[in-house]
């Protein structure tokens, strides 16, 4: 039997689904097509989540067609923004997977509060000549959002020290967008574009995400995973666990 190319092999259609997976093909060569690997590896996960007591085929999730944005960063962000806006208008929860962390910039104007799970602050005004770099994500969000909280930061550049930021150990806000840069994890767990030792364990990250139970998550992304089996499997497992947390 051929498995449907959808996250967790889900058979839900768009109208039935609560969560919409958006696979974004964008970024550096090592992670550009990671979304495809993440979806493929999700098909190898066990069908039942023992930790949260839920069957994955009971989670109402739908996988959007592959999104390959323009190579022009500003156009790419507008294209993704329009897709997100459409999904939100249907009262769905969008979940982008990729790919470069810069795709989070496309959410500007759609959400007011953010939790950024990241090893880095990403507060550069411009990086390598672009305002749309992965190193500028936090800065763009701060410019247009009410509140931003960080979890897992361990690398701070001198240029970023003049920007005020808040760290978060336990969730204290509601109605937020969650962005997970997988480099928050120690490199022993996963390969990412910008690895940094001394990171969180997988268990620590899951425990933090468990803190969103009962809160209103309006959208999410999971980014910066290198496209290899170990890393895409772990990312698929993390996304599946996050969905299980929200549904349990």
Image (tube, grey):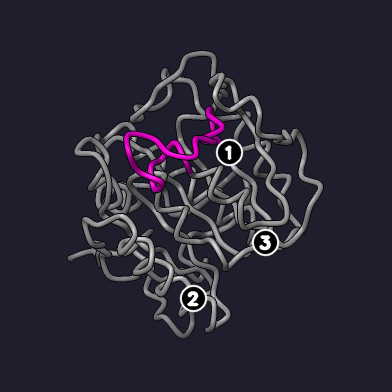
Look at discs 1 and 3 and give the one toward the viewer.
Answer: 3
Is 150 above or below relative to 159? Answer: below
Q: Quadrant of residue 1?
A: bottom left
Q: Residue furthest right?
A: 172
Q: Residue 194, position in %: x, y?
A: 38, 26
Q: Is residue 155 visible?
A: no
Instruction: Tell me if mark 1 has few (under 14), some (14-19) or many (20+) residues whose alpha carbon lies within 10 angstroms of its own.
Output: many
Q: Which residue is mark 2?
A: 85
Count all numbered tags in the image, as a single digit.
Answer: 3
Give x and y (percent) for residue 22. 38, 63
Image coordinates for residue 9, horizontal then vertical, percent: 34, 63
Which region shows up in magenta? 117-136
Q: Residue 155, position in %: x, y? A: 54, 20
Judged by its main secondary structure, the magenta piece is loop
Q: Which mark is residue 117?
A: 1
Q: Which residue is mark 3?
A: 112
The residue sitting at 48% across, 21% down in the picture is 186
State which mark lies toward you, 1 or 2: 2
CA gap, disc 1 and disc 3: 16 Å
């Amino acid at each position: 039997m051929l498995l449907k190319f959808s996250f967790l092999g889900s058979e839900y259609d768009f109208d039935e689904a609560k969560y919409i997976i958006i696979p974004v093909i964008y970024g550096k060569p090592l992670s550009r097509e990671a979304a495809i690997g993440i979806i493929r590896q999700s098909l190898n996960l066990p069908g039942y989540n023992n930790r949260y007591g839920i069957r994955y085929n009971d989670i109402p999730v739908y996988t959007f067609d592959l999104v390959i944005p323009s190579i022009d960063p500003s156009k790419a962000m507008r294209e993704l923004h329009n897709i997100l806006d459409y999904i939100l208008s249907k009262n769905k929860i969008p979940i982008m997977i990729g790919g470069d962390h810069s795709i989070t910039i496309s959410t500007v104007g759609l959400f007011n509060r953010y939790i950024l799970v990241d090893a880095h602050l990403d507060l550069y005004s411009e990086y390598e000549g672009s305002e749309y770099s992965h190193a500028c994500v936090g800065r763009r969000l701060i410019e247009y959002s009410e509140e931003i909280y960080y979890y897992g930061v361990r690398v701070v550049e001198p240029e970023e020290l003049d920007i005020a930021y808040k760290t978060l150990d336990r969730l204290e806000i509601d109605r937020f967008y969650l962005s997970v840069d997988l480099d928050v994890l120690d490199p022993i767990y996963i390969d990412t574009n910008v690895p940094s030792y001394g990171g969180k364990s997988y268990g620590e990250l899951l425990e933090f995400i468990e803190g969103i139970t009962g809160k209103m998550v309006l959208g999410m992304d999971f980014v910066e995973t290198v496209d290899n089996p170990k890393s895409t499997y772990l990312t698929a497992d993390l996304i599946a666990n996050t969905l299980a947390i929200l549904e349990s």
